[in-house]
Amino acid sequence: MENKVLLLSGNEAIALGAYEANIKVASGYPGTPSTEILETLLSYDGIYTEWAPNEKVAVEVAIGASFAGVRSLATMKHVGLNVAADPLFTSVYTGVRGGFVIICADDPEMHSSQNEQDNRNYAFAAKLPMLEPSDPFEAKEFVKKAFNISEEFDTPVIVRTTTRLSHVKGIVSPGNIEKSKVSPSIEKIPEKFVMLPSYARKRRVELDKRLIRLREFVETFQENKIELGDKRIGFITSGVSYLYVKEAFPNASVLKLGIVYPFPEKMIKEFASQIEELFIVEELDPFIELHVKAMGIKCKGKELIPSRNELSSYIVKNAILKEDIKKAVFEPVQIPLRPPNLCPGCPHRGIFYALSKLKVFVAGDIGCYTLAAFKPLNAVDSCVCMGASIGTAFGMEKALGKDALSKIVAVIGDSTFVHSGITPLIDVVYNKGFTTVIILDNSTTAMTGHQQNPATGFTIKDEPTVSIDLEALCRAIGVKHVYTVNPNDILGTQKLVKQEIERDEPSVIITKAPCVLLPEVRKIKNKPIYKINKCKGCMTCVKLGCPAIEWIPINDEKSKQKGNSQINRVLCAGCGQCAMLCKFDAIMMEEK
Amino acid sequence: MIKQQGNILFCGVGGQGILLASEITAFVLIASGFDVKKSEVHGMAQRGGSVVAHLRYGEKVFSPLIDIASADIEVAFELLESVRYLPYLNTKSKVIVNTQKILPPSVSTGVEQYPDNLLDILKEKDLSVFPINAFDMAKEAGDMRAVNMVLVGALSKFIPVNEDVFFNIIEEKIPKKILEINRKAFIFGQKAVLT
């Protein structure tokens, strides 16, 4: 096995590292760019792997496993750590038994996120070590080291990845499976596990002692390393930024931090003392820079290096040399944009069409359906974070009083509802709101690549399990008006939404139709294909924004009709939404 | 002359098999002794949006991203997308472009027109352009989804790797049931850039 060469993404390498670290329990919530870590873990034997309802639960499950003496992993995207911050901060006080590592995947440039927060700040704020690998090879090694650090120092450890590591593939070699020094058992250690103030105060002192030991450790940790080259110019950097520095300045001196918190101050001083001009290169916040400057060391950082978006070797080189070393040879050409779009046949499309007709304010949430904010639907009016739709809709209602009646709806996906939509719905009922909540139940967590969730009836391993009955759940909370409808019936759904938004009581409409990308839906044979005969050019179907409907303009000034719609047979998924909307009955199923 | 290091930019529309094409190429380069890094896009951008994958190879590769004006080869799975990534190209770049058109939302909803001069834009720029009707070739090979393999076949003519390695990797990575279709598609692609 030793000489085998694998091409793995950062996420796959992290999973392999966790396997080789001999973890027994892994929990997480899907979120780009972290999702594939748990999915890859499924292919290894001997690890209990699960999708948790949200990141807070995932971290709590991993803490429990650690308390029981096994190595455990929790995975999430950067914003997921906000959800899990509560257990995180106190687990640093309790410490661990089995090694406990959190993988958090940041998304600089917001490729698939609502913000680009820099989660290195969590390491400082929660007082725990954070490792930052730069490529898939290191990702695997660092995860193994993180587990050893966790057990040696009695602390949770975060391994931070970013999109440009999680979704970069590189060469990795498999290694040996390690052993934990701890064995599984139930141990009652209240002064360690029960964070009552009196115990927590004692653990707080232990935490400070641990940080002193960690600060000594990082001075000799192998992955903090000085690569001395040309001493006229030197860099302190970490993670993927290291790769950009090496590419841009192959001969310069570099201090590469494998652990970004705590800082190896002696090493930083020693390095800086040899360098004429010192630069700190890091994506997003000046995390390293502030510390180096606080040490009284002269260096340049964010006055040159952008604090937004991803870096590249090109950006780093230009910033440091302050000249455009390599201008684009060809300037961008103005061509139509190609933003992501709801798929042909997406069951969400019709609901948003209906909502646009009702001219309501749509408090949206996180999922594929947020894409309905774009033209031509323009039917999502807010999106903050997972589960925010219901609370924001309710807050608007309370601000506007009765004037808000029939003007606002909350829209949330099935997985997002389970993640953090239930508590705000309780708020609506408990505090006498009249919010109308539409749960878009497409039986999957679609945006992140179709993961199971507690409402689908299957586990991460596709084993059948209890499926949450969303309708019964909403009734149990106290919602009296709960409906389940097929969203492909656009007109029926529109009528029901209109009726419910006018009601002075909370209601929930569950629109149930599976995502068209689900394998079981794709497998269906003889799906209808629609065609358009004698199109009158009214453009009603075009307003659905379905990629399968193409508008062909008539370039003849004498023609009254401006164009025709046609259906792209390759793309049509046979949902029939357009046929339902056509006032002229011009859209019909193709005969086989 | 074919370089011993290189940057290949794959671009197209989500769902066209870009990741698999870049994956096969990466495996071929590794099997031929190169270090490789490949950068992909997942998540929201994949939903029918413009998709790009960066593949870099050489003795040792640091950055996973191709710099501006540094792509040696662009493999464009869709005509409009071939022009979108022009800033990555330089006068020595080769452009393999599938002439298939997939309408972006603004065109299919009648707000804008699909530009009709895209190949001219590329050709005016002194690029070596290899237009290929990969969609028709894939259909002829037996499955329209084999567009990606047609383009990999064309690409194989421009990287310093023995073609046997390509056939070995394709056999290893493609399910038996559709292997023959993919092989055919690959050969169509090879032939398309020779004429």
Image (spheres, helix red, strand yellow):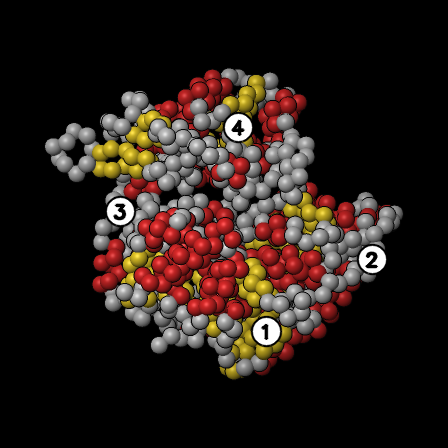
Question: Which chain does the residue under circle 2 lie in?
Answer: A
Task: Rate crowding at label 4 as few (under 14), some (14 to 19) or many (20 or more) other CA atoms within 10 Å.
Answer: some
Between circles 1 and 3, the one closer to the viewer is 3
Between circles 3 and 2, the one closer to the viewer is 3
Report how far apart the C-alphas of labels 4 and 1 lie in the structure.
54 Å
Report how far apart the C-alphas of labels 4 and 2 lie in the structure.
47 Å
Residue to which mark 2 is pinned: A182
| Picture residue at 73% right of the left edge, 55% below the top | A23
A214 vs A314, nearest the viewer: A314
Task: Name the spot of residue A77 as percent of width and height, x first.
Answer: 58, 50
Residue to which mark 3 is pinned: B114
Task: Rate crowding at label 1 as few (under 14), some (14 to 19) or many (20 or more) other CA atoms within 10 Å.
Answer: many
Task: Name the spot of residue B159 as percent of width and height, x first.
Answer: 41, 70
Residue to which mark 1 is pinned: A255
Q: Is residue B26 left or right of residue A533?
A: right
Q: Name the N-terminal-most of marks 4 and 1.
A: 1
Q: Can residue A130 be seen by looking at this rendering? A: no
Which secondary structure, mark 2? loop
Q: Name the N-terminal-most of marks 2 and 1.
A: 2
Quarter residue B94 falls in:
bottom left
Which secondary structure, mark 3? loop
Do residues under tags 4 and 2 come within 8 Å of each other at their CB atoms? Answer: no
Do residues under tags 3 and 2 come within 8 Å of each other at their CB atoms? Answer: no
Question: Which chain does the residue under circle 3 lie in?
Answer: B
Question: Identity of the amino acid at label 4?
Answer: Lys
Q: Can residue B131 be seen by looking at this rendering? A: yes
| Picture residue at 48% right of the left edge, 67% below the top | B165
Report how far apart the C-alphas of labels 3 and 2 lie in the structure.
64 Å
Q: Are marks 4 and 2 on the same chain?
A: yes
Report how far apart the C-alphas of labels 2 and 1 lie in the structure.
34 Å
